[in-house]
Image (cartoon, helix red, strand yellow):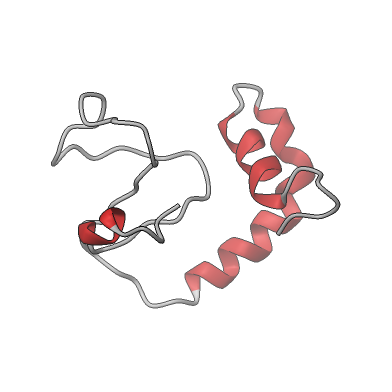
Amino acid sequence: MQFDGGPSLYILLNESLRAENREQLKPWFSFLKLFLTALYKLPSQNGVVWRGIKGIDLSTKYKTGTKFAWWGVSSCTTNVEVLELNQFL
């Protein structure tokens, strides 16, 4: 969702979610309320998901089997083979 070459919603929201200064989230409260309300209406899922970043090896930082919180809105997959496809960004 890119407009006129400016920063996208994804970039702006994730910058605020990952910022140390939590005050940066205040402008996002209404959007986050709407977004989370929609997410909570989806059926719950339990299992392993994979997140890949093309061109960066994070295997030493994030060990298999370790649970952690990812402070941002990110795509992920339940199938690790998806990360090997050419279509993967």
| Quarter location, residue 62 | top left
Q: Is residue 37 left or right of residue 31?
A: left
| Quarter location, residue 53 | top left
Query: Residue 41: x, y in percent?
Result: 50, 76
Of residues 20 and 4, which is closer to you in this image?
4
Of residues 79 and 69, which is closer to you in this image?
79
Instruction: Identify the residue shown where x is 32% and y is 61%.
Output: 77
Instruction: Identify the residue shown where x is 70% and y is 59%.
Output: 1
Of residues 59 and 84, which is closer to you in this image?
84
Q: Is residue 32 left or right of residue 45?
A: right
Relative to 56, is 83 above or below? below
Give the residue furthest to the front.
86
Relative to 59, is 30 above or below? below
Q: Is residue 74 left or right of residue 57?
A: right
Query: Residue 18: x, y in percent?
Result: 56, 32
Of residues 52 and 28, which is closer to you in this image?
52
Instruction: Identify the residue shown where x is 45% and y is 56%.
Output: 75
Relative to 83, is 56 above or below? above
Relative to 18, is 6 above or below? below
Give the residue furthest to the left.
65
Query: Residue 52: x, y in percent?
Result: 34, 46
